[in-house]
Image (cartoon, rainbow, N blue to C red):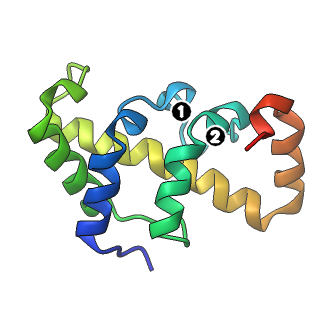
Amino acid sequence: MGVVDQAVLDMVFSTHKDLWSDFGIYEAISKNQGADAEGLAANRVFLKKLLHVQPSAVLLLTQVRQSVLRVVAADPTLNKTNLKNLVYASSRFDRLSAMLYHLRRAKRDEPKMRQLVAKATGDSLKA
């Protein structure tokens, strides 16, 4: 269910590296916290790209980490943190995992979806 063709995932991460190097508010939000409508909206372009290759919205840590490490090896300036590249790659997975979890939860739980939409602004719901 969570396995994606690694070459396809690598292409998504290398083509859209500007979209995953900083997830904005989701840099500080975990799965256990509530979804942030503005944060999801701000990251919707990259999330749509991932959902295109993995509609179940479930990714494996090893695959994401491998994709991030390949891109960071080619462009070390992407890791603007003090974290080692392996830890940084894992942090990218944690952030993505939280966003995808919030999307899956909102999709299967109508009250959660209404709550998420209620928190959003008109601008964030466009597109």
Q: Is residue 8 above or below residue 3?
A: above
At 70% from the left and 59% from the top, the residue drawn is 105
Q: Earlier in the sequence, mark 2 or mark 1?
A: 1
- In the visual, does 80 lie left or right of 42? left
At 53% from the left and 63% from the top, the residue drawn is 51
- In the visual, does 93 lie left or right of 79? right
- Tell me, for residue 117, which label it has, or none: none
Quarter placement of the C terminus: top right
> Tag 2, which secondary structure?
helix
Residue 120 location, quadrant: top right
The kind of residue tagged 1 is Tyr
Q: Is residue 44 above or below residue 3?
A: above
At 65% from the left and 62% from the top, the residue drawn is 104
- The residue to which callout 1 is attached is 26
Nearest to the observer: residue 33 or residue 100: 100
Q: Are marks 2 and 1 in contact (CB under 8 Å)?
A: yes
Nearest to the observer: residue 33 or residue 75: 75
The kind of residue tagged 2 is Leu
Q: Position of residue 10 (x, y in %)?
A: 25, 58
Q: Position of residue 112 (x, y in %)?
A: 82, 52
> Tag 1, which secondary structure?
helix
Q: Residues within 10 Å of mark 2 (few under 14, many from 20)?
A: many
At 87% from the left and 61% from the top, the residue drawn is 110
Q: Residues within 10 Å of mark 1 (few under 14, many from 20)?
A: many
- The residue to which callout 2 is attached is 40
